[in-house]
Amino acid sequence: MSGPPSQPIPAATLIVMRECDAGVPELLIVERSAAMRFAGGALVFPGGRVDPGDRALAALHAGDAEDVAARIAAIRETIEEAGLAIGVSGLADSEAARTDLYGGRPVGEVLAGCALDLDALVPFARWLPPGDVSHKVFDTRFYLARLPEGAAEAAVDGNENVRLFWATARHVLDMADRGDARIIYPTRRNLERLAQFGSFAEAAADARAYPVEAITPWVELRGGEELLCIPEGLGYPVTSQPVKAAFRA
């Protein structure tokens, strides 16, 4: 017997893309600690819930309040999890900023005096799992961003995440298919979509070509097999997967 519907928790994720001489961009990937309740041990993009400090800073910027707060959350989480300040200029020490953020200092104070370029984040997707589950449900907005030239070296936080690396979308999918990594259903679908592109510009153009609508997967019986499905027409080349093969956090 299921409990009452879970109240969605606003969250944000940043897909950082690094251009490579080989032509296929690499993505910033972190491996979550196995002890984490949500997606423990999985490979994910940096991200997390929108917190009150994100909303307070968002109130100082024009635009849709929820979108602006999510962009700021994505920036903050990437500083915390990878030591990278994306969409921020004038930050002298990203490691000190990470320490302050983990210590509970509001992001508005940590980034005081810095300039935010929220347009550096391109809306890519929004995923909202079904609410009729007992665990927490995250309403997650995904954004794309190019790694700027001269950016600091990314470094794992050793807290929520235990490993960090750069890899192409295809490589991460191959890792999962070999059983060398775990990726949750939304991450797999996003990696399949990202694997189509040879540059950040191509990915950003594709993101702008499709509406960013909340994607809520559902289970459907086809040919005697249960499939976990998402809608067509939102840019995803694969829109279903056998339930038994899908890893859901």
Image: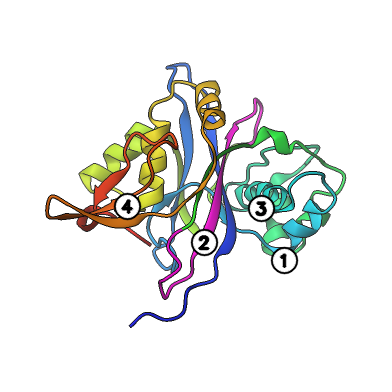
Marker disc for residue 237: none
Q: Which residue is mark 3?
A: 73
Q: Secondary structure at mark 2?
A: strand
Q: Which residues are magenta?
A: 129-152
Q: Secondary structure at mark 3?
A: helix
Q: Measured from the top left, where is residue 208 in percent x and y?
A: 57, 30
Q: Is residue 140 magenta-colored?
A: yes
Q: Amino acid at mark 3?
A: Ala
Marker disc for residue 104: 1
| Display colour scheme | rainbow
Q: Earlier in the sequence, mark 4 or mark 2?
A: 2
The residue carrying pointer 1 sits among few (fewer than 14), some (14 to 19) or many (20 or more) residues within 10 Å by Cα, namely few
Q: Secondary structure at mark 1?
A: loop
State the CA–CA distance, disc 4 to disc 2: 19 Å
Marker disc for residue 138: 2
Q: Earlier in the sequence, mark 3 or mark 4?
A: 3
Q: Amino acid at mark 4?
A: Arg
The answer to which image quadrant residue 188 occupies is top left
State the CA–CA distance, disc 2 to disc 1: 22 Å
Q: Which residue is mark 4?
A: 182
Between residues 97 and 148, which one lies in front from this camera angle?
148
Q: Measured from the top left, where is residue 43 in percent x and y?
A: 40, 50
Q: Measured from the top left, where is residue 103 in percent x and y?
A: 70, 65
Q: Nearer the viewer, mark 4 or mark 2?
A: 2
The residue carrying pointer 4 sits among few (fewer than 14), some (14 to 19) or many (20 or more) residues within 10 Å by Cα, namely many
Q: Nearer the viewer, mark 1 or mark 3?
A: 3
Magenta portion: prevailing SS class? loop
Q: Earlier in the sequence, mark 1 or mark 3?
A: 3
Residue in the picture at 68% in, 62% down: 51
State the CA–CA distance, disc 3 to disc 2: 13 Å
Quarter occupied by the N terminus: bottom left
